[in-house]
Amino acid sequence: MTDGVYAGRAGADGVRNQGWLLGHFMPRGDLLHSDEVEVKWGVHPPGERRAAWATHETRTALLVLIRGCFDIELRDRTVLLREPGDYVVWGPGHDHSWQAGAEETVVLTVRWPSVPGWRLPPPANGNNSGSAQTGDLRLAT
């Protein structure tokens, strides 16, 4: 990474940080550190549901379905993502939650800006590759 280029594998790289690949939470000076944007590769087991609603959101998010089925729950509607490439964008102020479908589901999430203070705790089993990978519970700002 010393030459300003990083090539990786989303599934393997994301294990270290609950699926997040790029954002403010990466070490300063690292090519993957950004205060402008966050990127996540979310792998969810069948039927997984977000542990808590994300509230008081201050960012904009784009979530793209790669494989499987995914429901994004907003307070006034649920957006059903069923075909690879289906996506949803929501802006600041939209509380959200989600649920994966009946098969393993993979989603790519991009949100901006990248701000500290939002994260669900890692799963109790220590496996950071699947649980609670889309959106974060507001802990502090």
Image: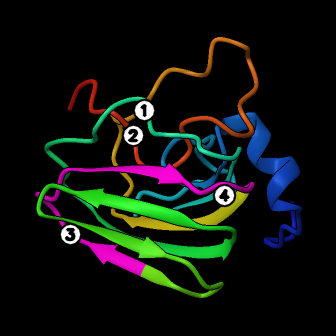
Disc 1 and disc 2 in contact, CB within 8 angstroms:
yes
The magenta-colored residue range is 88-104
Quarter of the view holding residue 106: bottom right
Disc 3 and disc 2 in contact, CB within 8 angstroms:
no
Q: Is 140 or 24 nearer to us in this picture?
A: 140
Is residue 58 inside the magenta stretch? Answer: no
Q: Amino acid at mark 1?
A: Arg
Q: Secondary structure at mark 2?
A: loop
- The first of marks 2 and 4 along the sequence is 4
Q: Is 37 or 82 nearer to us in this picture?
A: 82
Q: Nearer the viewer, mark 4 or mark 3?
A: 3
Marks 1 and 2, how far apart at CA:
4 Å
Q: Amino acid at mark 2?
A: Asp
- The first of marks 3 and 1 along the sequence is 3
Q: Secondary structure at mark 4?
A: loop
- The first of marks 4 and 3 along the sequence is 4
Q: Amino acid at mark 4?
A: Leu
Residue placed at 13% from the left, 44% from the top?
56
Q: Secondary structure at mark 1?
A: loop
Disc 3 and disc 1 in contact, CB within 8 angstroms:
no
Q: Amino acid at mark 3?
A: Gly
Label placed on residue 136: 2
Q: Which residue is mark 3?
A: 91
Marks 3 and 2, how far apart at CA:
14 Å
Label placed on residue 119: 1
Instruction: Pinpoint residue 6: horizontal percent, then vertical percent.
Output: 84, 67
Label 1 crowding class (10 Å Cα cut-off): few <14, some 14-19, many 20+? some
Marks 3 and 1, how far apart at CA:
18 Å
Residue placed at 54% from the left, 76% from the top?
64
